[in-house]
Image (cartoon, rainbow, N blue to C red):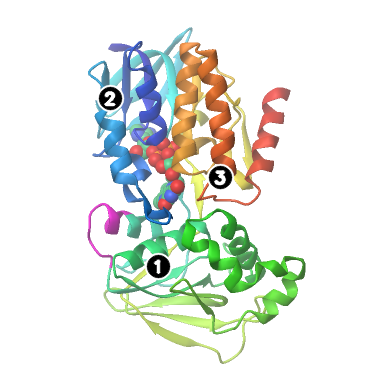
Amino acid sequence: MTHYEVIIIGAGPAGMSAANILKDEKRVLIVDEYYHYGGRLLGQLYEESKGSWWNGMDVAKHLHDVLDEKITLQLETSVYNVEKEDTEFTVFTNKGDFTSDYLIVATGAKENSYPLPGWELPGVMTVGAAQVLTNFHRVAPGDAGVIIGINPLSMVIGMELGYADIEVRKICLPAENKFNTTTPKDALLTLMGLGRSAPTKLLSIPAVIGSRMSPFHGMALKLFPSKGIKALGLPLSIKERVIKINGRDSVESVTTVKTNSDGSVIEGSEQEIKCDFVCISDGLSPVNEITSLFNLKHAYLESLGGYVPIHSEQMETEVDKLYVAGNITGIENAKVAMLQGEMAAHHISGNEAAVKNTLKSITDERKNAKVKFHKNLDAGRDKLQLYWLAK
Ligand SMILES: Cc1cc2nc3c(=O)[nH]c(=O)nc-3n(C[C@H](O)[C@H](O)[C@H](O)COP(=O)(O)OP(=O)(O)OC[C@H]3O[C@@H](n4cnc5c(N)ncnc54)[C@H](O)[C@@H]3O)c2cc1C
């Protein structure tokens, strides 16, 4: 069994950034189950500020190109178990088992979706799948689509589809059922939160929908036209729900209904929207299967996307020499994930000055983030710190 000083699970921005810090002093193995390094960076493409673009593929390539031969990057290698005995970790993969002194888990996030009648038809996918098809594989998911689910990710990816000349015919809510209870008010509040943090063009959304009226959400909701609005080229409708996806062999249309402000359906408002693909989006959750294998406390924090391993600001966990970094610690953008990877690595190296500087950079990035996935993120992070201190 080959032994490394550090094993990193996940070659996304967090894992690769950690490896880059450690490359001069430790023997490091990074494993990733995908055939390409970069994790979720691969799909990301948007304008951050006028004329300045965030191109995830370029960022991933840069992170990869600066790795050196001390780092072993092993792709198509899926970790299915981890154990710790005395001071040594054993990482079990489909390509053999490895041991290490330190382990960094940077397994990222997964997408959530809504079950709906017709969601098994070819042409139905998550927004993340449409993002990767379009921006990484350069394959259009279709000519005209409908996005079901209103959240930061669906708005960002809706815009990205537009950059590729793929028409989005509607972004609206899913049918209300026991898996989905999102109301028009929830959607409105999400959009208002998005205005401060999303890529630049979306900053004008609050102006479009009237976030200055935030003390008067009820009124804003009433005034929101039931046919929806064009927000930055995206046909956005918070008072419309898709109740089924139609088609014989693949997606041909969706059926929607209009709702009142409280989400109740308006009788006789059924409408058919022709489309050849449908994206479903119910946000992101941390991928915590690996940390769940240890005797380690996790906390459920909605603002961080779900269950996250309790960890310190330096990315340590309760298990000695086990670190976490990136979206497994809560859903945030790629820049925060990269800094968290660096933080774990600096802490492993015992570089106190770098730990201090990186902590400041993380705080600054959180403050200025162009993509923020939850408006109460700071409160979630504060709570997590309390759990860590109380452990
Ligand atoms: C669909 C989707 C779209 C997103 N779009 C954006 C966006 O547009 N802008 C933005 O800022 N953020 C976006 N994000 C958030 C994104 O997760 C972060 O920006 C960033 O990529 C997180 O970095 P990470 O290194 O923590 O995880 P990831 O980038 O997700 O990388 C984790 C890696 O771990 C690997 N892995 C997981 N489990 C195992 C295992 N058991 N064995 C081996 N390898 C494993 C995965 O294959 C993956 O390559 C998106 C997330 C998702 C899921």
Give the labeled residue for mark 2. Answer: 67
Residue type, mark 1 in image: Trp
Which of the two discs, 1 and 2, sits closer to the camera? 2
Per the model, the C-alpha gap separating discs 1 and 2 is 41 Å
Number of other residues with Cα within 10 Å of mark 3, as a class: few under 14, some 14 to 19, many 20 or more:
few
Q: Which mark is residue 119?
A: 1
Residue 130 lies, with reference to residue 250, above or below; the image says above
**Quadrant in the rendering for residue 252:** bottom left
Q: Which of 118 and 67 is in front in this view?
A: 67
Give the labeled residue for mark 3. Answer: 368
Residue 289 lies, with reference to residue 358, above or below; the image says below
Residue type, mark 3 in image: Asn
Check disc 1 and report its element: helix, strand or loop: loop
Count of numbered circles on the image: 3
Left or right side of 226 for 143: left
Which of the two discs, 3 and 2, sits closer to the camera? 3
Instruction: Tell me where residue 217 appears, x and y as whole percent.
Output: 72, 70
Residue 275 lies, with reference to residue 337, above or below; the image says below
Is 137 colored magenta in this rendering?
Answer: yes
Q: Which residue is drawn at 61% across and 29% down?
A: 310
Does mark 1's beta carbon lie closer than 8 Å to ligand 1? no
Q: Residue at x 29, y 43 (%)?
A: 58
Q: Which of 162 and 186 is in front in this view?
A: 162
Q: Which tag, 1 or 3, sits closer to the chain's start?
A: 1
Per the model, the C-alpha gap separating discs 3 and 2 is 28 Å
Q: Residue at x 54, y 20 (%)?
A: 355
Number of other residues with Cα within 10 Å of mark 2, as a class: few under 14, some 14 to 19, many 20 or more:
some
Instruction: Tell me where residue 165 appears, x and y as whole percent.
Output: 29, 70
Instruction: Tell me where residue 299 appears, x and y as whole percent.
Output: 63, 36
Left or right side of 75 for 173: right
Range covered by the magenta-colored residues: 132-141
Per the model, the C-alpha gap separating discs 1 and 3 is 37 Å
